[in-house]
Image (cartoon, rainbow, N blue to C red):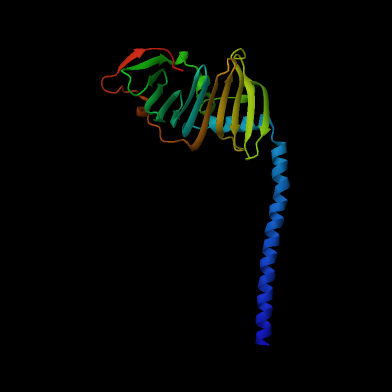
Amino acid sequence: MHQTARKEGCRQRVLNRWRLLLVAACVACAGLPARAQAAESMTARELAGRIDRHYNALHSLSVHFVQRYAGMGMDRKESGVLLLKKPGRMRWTYTDPDGKLFVMDGHNAYFYSPGETEAQEVDEKKLDDLRSPLRFLLGHTELEKELQGLRMVADENGVYTLTGVPKGLEQRVSALKITAAPDGTIRSMEIDETDGVTNSFDLSGELANAPAPNSAFVFTPPPGVHVVTGEPPV
């Protein structure tokens, strides 16, 4: 009797394991149509709204970036960390090339490249913010109103890409592409200009409301470097 009970107990444990596996498989299969349906039901308007809500609610942001610029005889790749703070402050600290710096204090922007004897000071009104994800990462945006011809495609890796043309820039920009996760977090941006130039940003490691003291947005030139009034660099 004791041996029979023990065999019955083993048999029951095996059955229980299979039941658990069966339940898990059923849950997973049940989730597939739901996820597929969610992907199909997501619209460009809904994704644009999620991006707006995510970034418009932030006060500051830190994110790793890889920037690629191709066109006009150039093919350049740079990377580093971008720190943003409302209103209108940002700091690009480059690690490749190491020492390159772009600081915007809310009024003026400062560009410095390692080895140079001059740093460029530019009025923020002259900046071309198409070359910066600032407008979309930390402003008060309404993508649906800012981009015309807005459309969306779902990628295989679970992200979505919005494509449109910024209003008022039709003569210069052929397409602005924003790839984002379902929660509205931007993963990459690409600006395709009508002259064939492509400027893209891959973003990772986003830290919402990151520490951002005002001192981080004050440009202090390195020893021997003079600040001169200039134009925004490419």
Q: Against 28, is 10 above or below?
A: below
Which residue extends farthest left? Answer: 224
Quadrant location of residue 149?
top right
Where is residue 115 shown, x and y percent of the image? Answer: 32, 22
Quadrant location of residue 116?
top left
Where is residue 43 shown, x and y percent of the image? Answer: 69, 32
Q: Nearer the viewer, residue 24 or 58?
A: 24
Q: Is residue 213 left or right of residue 156?
A: left
Q: Which quadrant: the N terminus?
A: bottom right
Q: Is residue 149 left or right of residue 139?
A: right
Where is residue 195 shown, x and y percent of the image? Answer: 58, 15
Q: Nearer the viewer, residue 159 or 50?
A: 159
Q: Is residue 16 left or right of residue 87?
A: right
Which residue extends farthest bottom? Answer: 1
Q: Nearer the viewer, residue 147 or 15?
A: 15
Q: Against 174, is 182 above or below?
A: below
**How many circles with numbers are drawn on the protein?**
0
* Residue drawn at 63 percent across, 34 percent down: 160
* Residue drawn at 59 percent across, 29 percent down: 178
* Residue drawn at 62 percent across, 14 percent down: 170
Where is residue 132 shown, x and y percent of the image? Answer: 50, 23
